[in-house]
Amino acid sequence: MILTEKPSNIYTAPLRGNRRMIVFILAIVSFLVLSFFTFSRSSLNLGGPSCGRTIRTLSEAVALSSSTSNSHGGQAKFINLNDLDATANAKDEQEHVLILTPLKNAEAYLPKYFELIDRLSYPKDLITVAFLVSDTDDKTVEILKRKADEFLNRQNPSQRYHEIAIYEKDFNFQLPEDKRHTFELQPLRRSFMARSRNYLLTAALREYHSWVLWLDVDVVNYPESILEDLQSVNVDVVVPNCLLQTEDNSFWGYDKNNWQETDKSIEMQKDLDPDYVLLEGYFEFLTSRYLMVDMPTHNDRLEKVPLDGVGATFTLVKAQVHREGANFPPYVFQHQVETEGFAKMAKAMGFGVYGLPGYLIHHIKNS
């Protein structure tokens, strides 16, 4: 911009004849040169970390100027959440799935984890995978970064995932591996797990996600079509039947957090202290609930049964359930915490929670 008025606090001597013209021309040339270098540094040379490339033509500079002129302002983002749905035909309807996995010292399990995810028949460009790594001292983060780079930059666009996110949040909670499943430490351990899941959920859930899958890193066998199969059941929360992987393929239940209340278990809870946490699969306190791992498995694998508690080895949730406020309580909610507390909360809000006793997946045997 050329000033048409001189500031009143600047004194200039009068110029006459050719001298006036020469000084005027020099002033214009100086202004143009100064403007060129200023513009080229601030707008044309964008090869730094903020952009990653250099603009080489004037037309590019003009386009950039137009696109960045509102860098301190702009239009509101409008998203109609009424149009977001989770249906039985999710694949055909191009519905996005968010896979969430909390991790701690998981390097030994990650190769199989990524192998199984990559076998899924659901379109990869509709899949987001997000991790929360906590209190870890192995190579978990290093492996995640390497696999994310591989999955996001494949030559074939159809084989690239929509997004992979790695979050890190330490809770400074250390528990010896041999004490991980002891009865006395479960309420505290599960409370920290609930906090971890809530951090991951709130960090990763986007407005376009229709489904949320909670997947354990050490699940070692499930069908390629499992997402489409579970979506076809078309319920708010659904879990398959997770068994323990054994060398002789014998039937051993693993995820005992999938269960139904019984008349006996409901009656027993009437006399419990409100802050008492019930745990499944421990002889120290028998709950008298009906575990899904004890239900018949010979029926159709998509035949569903209502559940009152769920684990999270492989739990598919319509994103609406989480958006409306059902999360993982780190506190005691109806005698439960974490995943079973989530199921209780979802049911209290009117959502349906179901299991598929005949749909079998397998979990590795932990130390």
Image: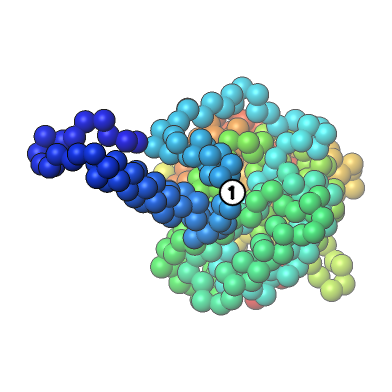
The percent position of residue 345, horizontal first and vertical second, equals: 53, 37
Looking at the picture, tell me which residue is in the foreground, 155 or 83: 155
Query: 148 or 13, which lies in front?
Result: 13
Residue at 41%, 33% (x, y): give it. 73
Decide if residue 277 is on the left or right side of residue 140.
left
The residue at 72%/64% (across/down) is 150
Instruction: Let me know if residue 278 appears in the view.
Output: no
Identify the colour scheme used: rainbow
Q: Residue at x 47, y 27 (%)?
A: 76
Question: What residue is shown at x 49% (from left), y 56% (from top)?
Answer: 45
In which quadrant will I find the C terminus? Answer: bottom right
Residue 115 versus residue 287: which sits nearer the camera? 115
Q: Is residue 116 left or right of residue 328?
A: right
Residue 72 appears in the picture as rendered: yes
Residue at the extreme front = 17
| Secondary structure of residue under mark 1 | loop
> Of the residues shown, which amino acid type is indicated by label 1?
Thr
Q: In the image, residue 53 lies at what x, y percent? A: 57, 57
- Quadrant housing the N terminus: top left
Q: Which residue is labeled 1 in the image?
A: 57
Residue 330: image location, x then y, percent: 45, 50
